[in-house]
Image (cartoon, rainbow, N blue to C red):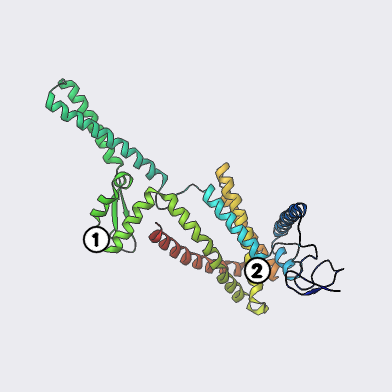
């Protein structure tokens, strides 16, 4: 007598271990705690083993792609899932191990904080000078010393208080702020200064101030959208490869999977480089980028099986077009992130 599969309701023989339609295991509906723990450990370690096997195969350029289209798929992580995991890992590494801020250098930020201290010291001395004028409590020598200190601090303040200008596509700046204003001036007062300018000048000016005061917020906002860009760029890369190798009559998905795999390798290499620079500070990111380019070149040679010279020519064309697509997408991403983040 045959039973029904509780998952898909297909007929299943009692002696069968699995449903022939959906693959669910033929077992009692009641699950013990032991089975739950066993299933969890099996799935976790099975994924780990598949991941390690995928990375090991990925270490040989194009080998994972060849294995995938030769039918050996069960023992490796599917390309899209592997790519998603690597993108998230790469973005996490960038967010945690990269210390640079957008639009402003660390020196600007340090100078801004120093200007606030100088401004407070100058204000204190000026208050003392006003008190002296009223009470006449200090000698001429003491007044001169106080005046010299005030002049010294004022000259230092003026020398450090550079003007930061924001240009877009015009010779004249959209907005200009001193470092002290960016660091400490109330937003309302800055908004009043920009009130007579066109609305888009005011919008960019407000975002400019917010970016200076909280660069981490823009970074978080940007990285959240960078992951989408990394997925959007893949079809373009697949189309470029399809155009470069159109005589081989390959399906588009073959180029797409190849692009997925070599991006995974590149992201992992660059992530290791960023971590190396953070821990050791020795140009590891640059080395990782060079290695990733070499990896892609070798992968193209092995997968498409053309001569080294011909592959190099197509490698150059691929990266010129890749660069143009990246610049376009990143520019749109930066502009939209800068204008929209709150």
Q: In the figure, residue 126 lies in which quadrant? A: top left
Secondary structure of the residue carrying numbered label 1: loop
Q: Position of residue 41 (x, y in %)?
A: 74, 53
Q: Examine the rendering and report whether any part of residue 289 can be seen.
A: no
The residue to which callout 1 is attached is 197
Q: Which residue carries the number 2 mark?
A: 257
Q: Work out whether mark 2 precedes mark 1 in sequence or the reverse, and give the earlier one.
A: 1
Within 10 Å of the Cα at label 1, are there few (<14), some (14-19), or many (20+) other Cα atoms? few
Looking at the image, which is closer to me, 76 or 37? 37
Q: State the SS at label 2.
A: helix
Which residue is more in the foreground, 287 or 189? 189
Q: Position of residue 147 (x, y in %)?
A: 20, 29
Count of numbered circles on the image = 2
Could you tell me which quadrant the C terminus lies in? bottom left
Of 270 and 336, nearer the camera is 336
From this viewpoint, is residue 314 visible? yes
Q: CA distance from mark 2 to mark 1?
A: 50 Å
- Where is residue 26, by image quadrant? bottom right
Position of 61 with respect to 91 (left or right) is right
Residue at image coords 22%, 28%? 148
- Viewer-proximal residue, 234 or 163? 234
Q: Position of residue 135 (x, y in %)?
A: 13, 24
- Image quarter of the N terminus: bottom right
Question: Would residue 213 be found to the left or right of residue 302 on screen?
Answer: left
Q: CB under 8 Å between callouts 2 and 1?
A: no
């Amino acid at each position: 007598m045959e039973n029904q599969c509780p998952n898909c309701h297909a007929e299943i023989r009692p002696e069968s271990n699995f449903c022939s339609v959906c693959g669910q295991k033929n077992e009692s509906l009641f699950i013990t705690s032991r089975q739950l723990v066993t299933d969890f450990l099996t799935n976790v370690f099975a994924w780990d083993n598949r991941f390690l096997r995928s990375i090991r195969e990925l270490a040989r350029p194009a080998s994972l792609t060849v294995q995938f289209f030769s039918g050996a798929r069960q023992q490796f992580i599917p390309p899209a899932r592997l790519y998603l995991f690597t993108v998230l890992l790469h973005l996490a590494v960038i967010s945690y191990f990269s210390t640079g801020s957008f639009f402003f250098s660390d020196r600007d930020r340090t100078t801004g904080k120093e200007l606030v201290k100088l401004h407070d010291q100058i204000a204190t001395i000026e208050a003392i000078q006003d008190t002296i004028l009223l009470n006449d409590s200090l000698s001429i020598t003491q007044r001169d010393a106080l005046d010299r200190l005030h002049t010294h601090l004022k000259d230092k303040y003026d020398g450090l208080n550079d003007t930061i200008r924001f240009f877009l596509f015009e010779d004249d700046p959209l907005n200009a702020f001193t470092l002290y204003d960016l660091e400490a001036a109330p937003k309302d007062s800055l908004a009043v200064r920009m009130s007579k300018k066109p609305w888009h000048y005011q919008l960019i000016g407000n975002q400019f101030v917010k970016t200076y005061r909280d660069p981490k917020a823009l970074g978080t906002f940007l990285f959240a959208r960078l992951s989408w860009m990394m997925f959007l760029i893949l079809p373009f890369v697949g189309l470029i490869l399809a155009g470069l190798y159109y005589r081989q009559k390959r399906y588009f998905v073959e180029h797409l999977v190849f692009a997925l795999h070599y991006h995974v390798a590149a992201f992992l290499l660059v992530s290791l480089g960023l971590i190396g620079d953070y821990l050791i500070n020795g140009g590891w990111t640059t080395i990782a980028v060079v290695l990733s380019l070499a990896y892609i070149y070798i992968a193209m040679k092995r997968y498409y099986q053309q001569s080294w010279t011909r592959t190099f020519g197509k490698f150059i064309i691929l990266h010129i077009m890749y660069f143009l697509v990246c610049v376009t997408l990143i520019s749109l991403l930066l502009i939209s992130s800068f204008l929209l983040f709150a």
